Image (cartoon, helix red, strand yellow):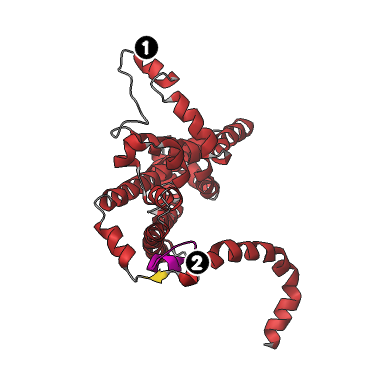
Amino acid sequence: MSGFKSFLRRNWVLYAMISPAVALVFVFSYVPIYGLIIAFQDYQPVYGFNGSAFVGLKWFRSVLRMPDFGQIFFNTFIIAVAKILLNQIAAIFFALLLNELKGTVYKRVIQTFSYLPYFLSWVVIGGVFITLLSMDGAFNSILEFFGADRVFFLGSNSWFRPTVVITDVWKNYGWNSILYIAALSGINEELYEAAVIDGAGRWKQTLYITLPGISSTIVLLACLNLGGILNAGFEQLLVLYNPAVYQTGDILDTFVYRSGLVDAQFSLATAVGLIKSLLGFAMILISYKLAEKYAGYIIF
């Protein structure tokens, strides 16, 4: 105990600095956990948490019997997996291209512009894409100019998922490339010099030096991204989707929003959210185990 007191006395300033953030996490992330009790109740706001009738696993059974739940779960999974894969591929590709640029100023300008979409809300970007991708929008006008038929990207079940994934990749590829750019800067330049002497071109250097040099970062991020395999992007979907594409665009988060806040089915929505959280927690544990095994990453 004396050792801990001595440590605390030396580092109290650091603890004081993080205390506001800890307080916010506690208030907004831990205190609301108590509200999960309504997933096991026939919750009525007028009776509150303590007065509502306890119904056990009724709402969980109702969720699993819902005819649309399987489709909603599949939509969540397929959109999330597509985003994880394509975001990582796009970030790696962009980092490799940026690494080939020699002009420092030009490289920084491109990096800055690639980061900008990440800091814009989906409310703003979604409004732009809704206008651009509408039947009378600029993108369809270009398609018509080249002789193609107009496509209702945000109203077609065939096109909605690809549109969602591609727009998400466009928004995030610059920001996601930061870690790969940092990993590229750590590769020994002497390896490239030796490769040039041996007659290796840029493609061979990329294949046998650059990619192996950042392979541990690629594996680590791929493993950690598994924890978000059920996070398909609530804000983006809420802004872009509509009833016409519920079949392919409705995900767990949007279903919880509609059921809980729109239809006032609080217990049902909480049950769905709890199922998603438990599955996500399991995937996080698996992802950390994989990261430890294949990338040597240890957090605890």
Figure check: 150 above or below 51:
above
* In magenta stretch: residue 36: yes
Say the numbered circle drawn on residue 135.
Answer: none
Which of the two residues, 271 or 194, is positioned nearer the viewer here?
A: 271
Determine which residue is flagged by label 2: 48
The amino acid type, in three-letter code, at marker 1 is: Phe
Q: Sequence-wise, which precedes: disc 1 or disc 2?
A: 2
- Residue 101 located left or right of residue 161: right
Figure check: 299 above or below 242:
below
- Find residue 98 and report its horizontal and vertical position in percent: 52, 36
For the N terminus, the quadrant is bottom right
Determine which residue is flagged by label 1: 145
Q: How far apart are labels 1 and 2 at the CA level?
A: 60 Å
* SS state under label 1: helix
The residue that appears at 70% across and 87% down in the rendered structure is 2
Which residues make up the magenta segment? 35-48
Residue 14 appears in which quarter of the rendering?
A: bottom right
Which of the two residues, 183 or 137, is positioned nearer the viewer here?
A: 137
Which of the two residues, 35 or 42, is positioned nearer the viewer here?
A: 42
| Residue at the farthest front position | 46
The residue that appears at 28% across and 64% down in the rendered structure is 61
- Residue 239 located left or right of residue 74: right
- Find residue 63 and report its horizontal and vertical position in percent: 30, 58
- Find residue 119 and report its horizontal and vertical position in percent: 58, 40
